[in-house]
Amino acid sequence: MLSAAYLVSLSQTGPAGIGTSSINVFWIKADAGTSSSVNGAAISAWNDQSGNGINVTQTVSSQQPSFATNVINGFPAVQFDNVTTTNDKMIGPDSPILDNTAGYSFFTVTRPQSLDGNARVIVSKRTTVSVDQSFMLFYYTGNKLAIDIQTTDNRFFTNATLSNNTNYILDIIYDGSLATSSRVAVYSEETLDKTATETASFVPDNASPLILGTTDATDPRPYGGYIAEVIIYREALVPAQRIIVNNYLSAKYDIALSANDKYNGDDALQGHYDFEVAGVGMESTGSNPSFSPSVSGGLGIAVNSGFNAGDYILAGHAVMVNSQTTTDVGGMTGTNNARWLRIWYLDVTNSSTALNTDIEFDMSDGGAPFAGPTTANNYVLLYRSGLTGNWTEMTTASAISGDRILFNGITLNNDGYYTIGTKNYIVSTLPIELVNFDAKVNGSKVDLTWRTASERNNAYFTVEKTIDGVNFETVEIHKGAGNNSTLKTYASVDKHPYEGLSYYRLRQTDMNKTVSYSPFVSIEYLTDDTKISIYPNPSEGLLNIRSKIFLLNSAEVTIEDLEGKSLYSKSFDAVKNREVLIVDWQNKTGAGSYLVKVTSGTTRFIQKIIFK
């Protein structure tokens, strides 16, 4: 029987397994939640991963940052420009969970590109200078990091001078319960840079938005650089928690820690096990006794006993796409051996007493829930000391709870490689389902491909498309593999794609008629008949907008300033033999750059035009 304490202990779902959404109030990372993952594409939304839904957005095209692939250790980042007056910025809603607190912990991963002594803001929450100001973290005078907590009256700067085109992990810990002279501390790559004075013992509920890339919503000063990850807690983390988060960020972004490096799995010698690092740890001031499988790709650990100051277990993996594999299973017993492709490197720092732990593998977090018969004693915890070689079956599973395999009372003393195996995958599966789903324009068609790593009772796939996300049309139906434990690739072709922007999804139906859906993928399909051109540029006020789509569809033309204010709007009916719309805008707002937007049918088009 699974104890209640164990269930509670594995609820730590924040970054690296630190905290839950009640204290981890904001978490953005460029490898999740961006409105586009295409290199150079504008980003209109960046969704909060904390579970609190504090998403940051930007509707003004000229102020949208861009997505950049492979920026820091192969991971993407969001690039904010260095354009004064129309600087990139993203704004999130006010929420009392973002302030109304006596403590904060901020973690940022950035690469500044425009440091010059001016205010280059990473993240802020304020209306304007010292008005409803909860916090602001920014590069400033002397190219140092500046920190404001509750107004600007105790602003302080790091000792360290920061440089352009350098990757940084910078943390700020604010604890209103401490003496005034030591309430704020800043860490650079886990080394304490400075402790500073802060008179405010509490940050009230300030009615102000959360902002990335500038001091406040109307400030024209740009950030100018990359932001890869920002994490905010509404309390001061204890040192063990801070150390674990920094080890997660260090492994992920290959930024060396100058102190408290507790995880060697990210080193080349260990095979670069950089992904989804999470951990447990204890110092004399407090501990983090567990982490959830949801933050580590399917593996969770809780410490039962033996925890002493200086003890840590950190785990990370090297495989982003998991699957069941029947290869590299040497040393296992049984008749139909298989294991997860995903392996974790565990770095165990044990000061004295042996660490007794509970370990679980969550099938949903590792890939997909069960769909078939299972037997607990077929599942084994596998270990080996090196990257290759035979596995040792440490123990069989204690129990199965839902789609979780539980191994209770496990002594962990050794660094090395751990995963879950099954001694009979026919009876006791390690299910993984959809690996990816992609759509690409190919001439006058759209090619759709998807891969499954395994299937259980899969009857068929239905490829669907939609324009509005409400009404769907079937493209094609594909028979599923039923039960399959190897990678399988499917392909479909939409020979009659919608014009303009549309969306595709997979509807998967089980043998028992249970239905599930894939995420959407978007496609913009334009032909010679739907392409739009606007000229001249620059213009003195008269514009020609050309497209064959106007022969069949009405059109809406709007002109906005770079702040998004509408200055002109006109509807045009479809008229046979007319391919060019004439727009005569009597510009009374002055020369400069404006956005011309055209909507016709399902086609949407935007272009920046300079008016003289």
Image: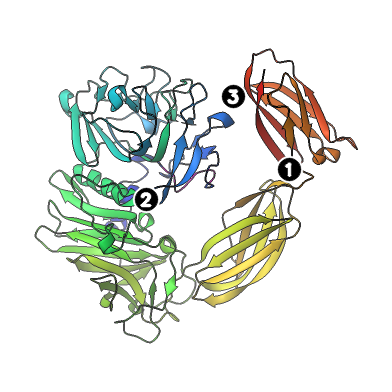
> In the figure, residue 272 lies in which quadrant?
bottom left
Q: Is the magenta stretch mostly helix, strand or loop?
A: loop
Counting from the top left corner in percent of width and height, residue 235 is at 28, 36
> In the figure, residue 23 lies in which quadrant?
top left
To which residue does mark 1 refer?
A: 602
Side of 590 where 405 appears, left or right: left
* Mark closer to the chain start, 2 or 3: 2
* Residue 73 tag number: 2
Amino acid carrying mark 1 in the image: Thr
Residue lying at 21% horizontally and 65% vertically, measured from the top left = 415
* Mark closer to the chain start, 2 or 1: 2
In what element is the residue under mark 1? loop
Q: Against 294, is 100 above or below?
A: above
Residue lying at 19% horizontally and 23% vertically, measured from the top left = 197
Amino acid carrying mark 2 in the image: Asn
Residue lying at 35% horizontally and 58% vertically, measured from the top left = 293
In what element is the residue under mark 2? loop
- Kindly report which numbered mark, 2 or 3, lies closer to the viewer in this rendering: 2
Task: Identify the residue at the far bottom of this view.
Answer: 335
| Span shown in magenta | 29-36
Marks 2/1: CA–CA distance: 39 Å
- Kindly report which numbered mark, 2 or 1, lies closer to the viewer in this rendering: 2
Q: Does the magenta stretch include residue 256?
A: no
Counting from the top left corner in percent of width and height, residue 163 is at 31, 33
